[in-house]
Image (cartoon, coloured by chain):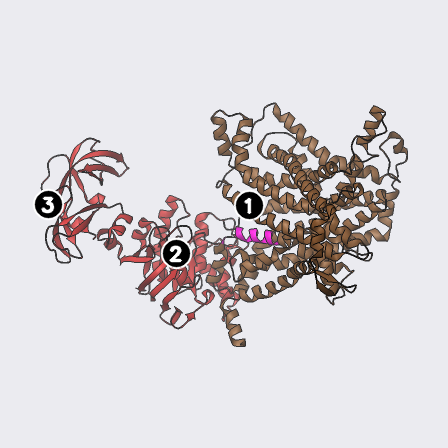
Amino acid sequence: MLSVHGLTKIYANRFDAQAGGVRDVSFELPTGTFFTLLGPSGCGKTTMLRCVAGLERPDAGRIAVPDRVLFDSATSVAVPMNQRGIGMVFQSYAIWPHMTVFENVAFPLRVAKGRRLAKQDISRMVDQALTTVGLADYGDRPATRLSGGQQQRVALARAIVHRPQLLLLDEPLSNLDASLREEMRVELRRLQQQIGVTTIYVTHDQGEALAMSDRIAVMERGRIVQVDEPRAVYFRPANEFVASFIGAANLLTGLCLGDVAAGALGRVRLADGEAIVSQFPAGCTLGHHATVSVRPESIVLTAGAATGDNTLRGTVSAASFQGGSMRYDVAVADRTMRVIGPADPVFPPGTTVHLSFPATASVSVG
Amino acid sequence: MTASLLAFVKQDPRRLIAVLVGLLLAVLMLPPLWILLQDSVTTTDAMGDVTGGTVSHFVRLFTDKDALTSIWNSLVFAGGSTVLSLISGGALAWIVERTNAPFKILAYLATIISMGTPYILHVIAWLFLLGKVGPLNDVYRLLTGSTNNLFNVNSMAGMILIEGFLWSPLVFLLLGATFRAANADMEEAARMSGATVFDTLRRISLPLAMPSILALALFVFIRAIGGFEVPALVGMPGRIYVLTTDVYEATIVVPPDLGYAAAFSVVMVAIVAVLLFYYSRLSRNAEKYHSVTGKGYRPRPFDLGRGRWIAGAMIVLNFVVVLLLPLLTLLWMSLLPFLRSIRWSGLAALTFKNYRTVFSAPGYVELALNSLVVAAGSATAIMLITALAGWIAARRGPGGRILDQLATLSLVFPGICLGVAVMEVYLRVPLPIYGTLWIIGIAYVIRYMPYGMRYVYSGVLQLHRELEEAAGVAGASAMTTLRRIVAPLLTPALVAGWLFIFLIANKELAIAVLLASPGSQVIAVAIFDQWVNGQGGELAAFGLVWTVLMTGIACLFFAQMRRGATDVYGN
């Protein structure tokens, strides 16, 4: 288990008015969790990871694993990074070019403080780690003669060879090409479950986060704005930021037509006069402003008239074929809504269509 | 106290390195500056002890007509040679890097060999070429029947001409890098829009390169204003004095007028410091303009059509002027028992006597060994110090800024001023190193520390930061990371810096000229003395042998640079 409490690390303003860093971040992770920090660049997710690794010194807060405290500003505890026993994969992989694959992976075992391992133990552990990542026969290779994917696997082997309690991954897939990235997603998740190591994964790619994580923390401007399971983050975004950052949600604004209890359904009158039914996880008060998120793929387009609660009328303004699906921009009153529909039927631009979506697919986000 | 000190170091072990290296740098770098300032505003007795404060040195300097003339001469000399070297070296760089002109190899050859040749040898060759008995005036007299000379080399024009040629290879090298880094797309876009090659050059290439060119101009100006070889050998016989020769004269008169020399030096240091300030601002701007693209990028050269042969001719001309003529001149000088004009009749007098002397006389071997040892020793010391200081500075470690500033402080010293200052410092320090090679070595270390710093700094910046962080997270202490990750990866940069310092230490005359004594001679000073004593033949023979040796080392340097450029370390 890892617990982070009240972690704050603020950078002075550098290039623009926005100061970087993290502010008052707390979370607890049960052992074996695959935990993802997700957010746009500059949101503080990498700073967060570097604080846990010991590469940055937080301004305030507490970081602890079950048997010891790694950092605590209250008691001035700060374990140096080389004594934290953490495994980390860097964005650039940071494979040392002057060593062989074997030496790269063996490095954490050779420099480990307080325990000198026998040669055959090192050899055995390195081989095991290399086998785990599927590079069993690569030990003698110079590190400069590896493809991007292989470098990534070596970096992973190096991070797990000393069996850390905690594995940190800093956008490890961002330097790979698209097809390899998909493959490594599955692979990385399989490995993590096989070893059972608690993992913190940093990414700006929502697809990666949704596919791999047990839990996702969405970060914005140095704060965690939502921590949840992938499905919850996707279908019940906590606010507008989460809704628009994860999947391109349609955000509809209007006024509540009645008092709504938290977790219940309620009606919202949109600016153009249409009323829709939506979920209100936090409730709402009559006459108050409400923003509702609707996922593009939750909306069904029909040519003929549709009935039911959540039905809007619009005109297709753009349609593009995306292989497995069609993507539409539909002009509804004075706004454009994005819709993902099946590859068939096709609604060409100019077609008048009806958009309908179930009440459970529209969620108030504030 | 000890406990808190221990905790202070334990929190970040680099602090201990920073403190130790910082102290060492301070002891090396600060005293020369301090002593110059002190000397310039005090009077001293015969023992060198301070007897009182005075502003008389500065008053003399700013009221004496000769001194003001020297300042003016310095500016004209530095300005003129900067413009000349920029035009000749710059045009060459553009032709070689950005066009399809033939004979490019000659330009590199000239650069490599001139890296290994002491400046003073070039100057001597040019003095002969343009001098009274040299071929230029000789041919003029033969053609016109006149007894006058066409060109008086011991003039401001002669000084500017020779200094300009001295710096042209460096300009070629540095501007070549700029032109290589320029984005060919921008030039091609101009060509596609209908611009001619010349229009493209004038409206696109030059404006883009302008910040780099200005920064380089300032750099050459700084080096030229502190230049000593040309003012001493070309200017002084013609009674044209600049600041560096004034400092030299004031130091070698008996009794030495050290206060006056120091005042001159302070003026020069002040000028250079101001110029350096603008230089650092300019070169930062120049980096912003760099439009280097990502991977797989190859600059595509302009097709000059038939014009490529004209451009090729310019490369050949440059090769002949900058390299071949001086070397042939030295060869001629070395094969004659005494200096004379180039005639067929002279062929009969050709002899290898000078070469025999050079290889048999023990003085020359000792001289060569002295030079090699002191250059190698100071290069080694510098790279050891800057490997630590540069690493901490580049990684923004504890005290990094201070280390950086201390290590690059000596940039403000023109060589001759540093010579005066180091002499003064180590005359007063109770260390028996005055009159030995040690003092020259220390002066070299101070003088070339900034170069070592530059090599290490940019070397560290090329190493991805995560390579070190990965070692730290993997459990390595700061020391282990330094030893097992940073040092091996930094080796190419350290080797390149070492070779560069080794070469340049053997080239320059100005620092050692005041510090060398009969028992501790180095190459450049010995050549200077021989020239003054009229032993032209022996010095030419020795100089040529030396140039061959140094060219070999210069080849190593360029090979190392090329290797460093192709190694991609974690980026």
User: Is residue B484 among what the camera can see?
Assistant: no
Q: Is residue A357 left or right of residue A322?
A: left
Residue B192 falls within the magenta-colored stretch: no
Q: Position of residue B276 (x, y in %)?
A: 60, 49
Q: Position of residue A358 (x, y in %)?
A: 14, 47
Q: Determine the CA span between mark 1 and mark 3.
A: 66 Å
| Picture disc at residue B283 | 1
Residue density around tag 1, few if under 14, some if 14–19, many if 20 or more, within 10 Å: some
Q: Which mark is residue B110?
A: none
User: Relative to the observer, which residue lies in front, A36 or B156?
Assistant: B156
Q: Nearer the viewer, mark 1 or mark 3?
A: 1
**Coordinates of residue A325 in the picture (x, y in percent):** 25, 39
Where on the picture, by quarter, is residue B124? top right
Residue annotated with mark 2: A46
Q: Which residue is mark 3?
A: A309
- Alpha carbon separation for disc pair 2 and 1: 32 Å
In depth, the one of A313 and B408 nearer the eye is: B408
Label 2, residues with CA under 10 Å away: few <14, some 14-19, many ≥20: many
Q: Could you tell me if the residues under marks 1 and 3 are in contact, i.e. CB atoms within 8 Å?
A: no
Q: Are marks 3 and 2 in contact (CB under 8 Å)?
A: no
Above or below for A195 versus B201: below
User: In the rendered view, does B345 fall on the left or right side of B281?
Assistant: right
Considering every residue shown, the one lying at the far top of the view is B306
Chain identifier, red in the render: A
| Chain that bears disc 3 | A
**The residue under label 3 is which amino acid type?**
Asp
In the image, which residues are magenta? Answer: B452-464
Task: Give me the chain letter of mark 2.
Answer: A
